[in-house]
Amino acid sequence: HVQLVESGGGSVQPGGSLTLSCKVSSTTKLTFCMGWFRQAPAKERKAVAVIDMDGKINYADSVKERFTVSRDDEQATLYLQMDSLKPDDTAMYYCAASISILEGDWAEAARYQYWGQGTQVTVS
C-alpha cells in the first residue's frame, strides 16, 4: 500500500512564493519516480516537474526557472518550490509516483500508479 499526502498549498499574490511537500508512505520499500502535476478547472491534468530515482529532473516549459523540484529519500518527501507565481499557476497540484517509467513518458499522467489527493494553489 502506497499513500501520498500533499501539503503547503494556499493563496498568494502574483510574484509570491509557495513550497509544496508530498510525504510518501509505503508498506514495502519501493523506489519511485516522483512528480508534480496540476489541474485547473475544466482543463486536463498536466505535468509540472518530475524527478526520477537517479535525480534526473524534467520541467514543463511554463515553469522553468521559476519552480524547483527536489526529493529527500531519507524523509520520503518530495518538494516543489514555486517562485514568481503567476495567476496562470492557479490549479490543484497533485503529487504522483511511478515504480517504473520511461524517460520519454515523464509527462504522461497515465504512467503514474500512485496519486495524492491534491493541494490547491491560488494566485490572485
Image: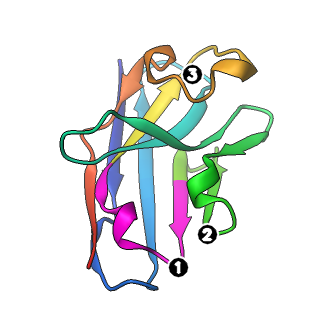
**Is 115 rendered above or below residue 58?**
above
**Is 63 rendered above or below residue 107?**
below
> Which of the two residues, 16 or 32, is positioned nearer the viewer here?
16
Q: Would you name the residue on which mark 3 appears?
A: 29
Amino acid type, residue under disc 2 in the picture = Arg
Amino acid type, residue under disc 3 in the picture = Lys
In the image, the segment drawn in magenta is 79-92
10 Å crowding of disc 1: few (<14), some (14-19), many (20+): some
Q: Would you name the residue on which mark 1 appears?
A: 84
In this rendering, the label closer to the viewer, 2 or 3 = 2
- Does label 1 or label 2 sit earlier along the sequence? 2
Residue at the (32%, 44%) spot, across then down: 5
How far is disc 1 from disc 3 in space, using C-alphas?
A: 36 Å
What is the x, y in percent for residue 62? 57, 56
Q: Are marks 1 and 2 in contact (CB under 8 Å)?
A: yes
How far is disc 1 from disc 2 in space, using C-alphas?
A: 6 Å
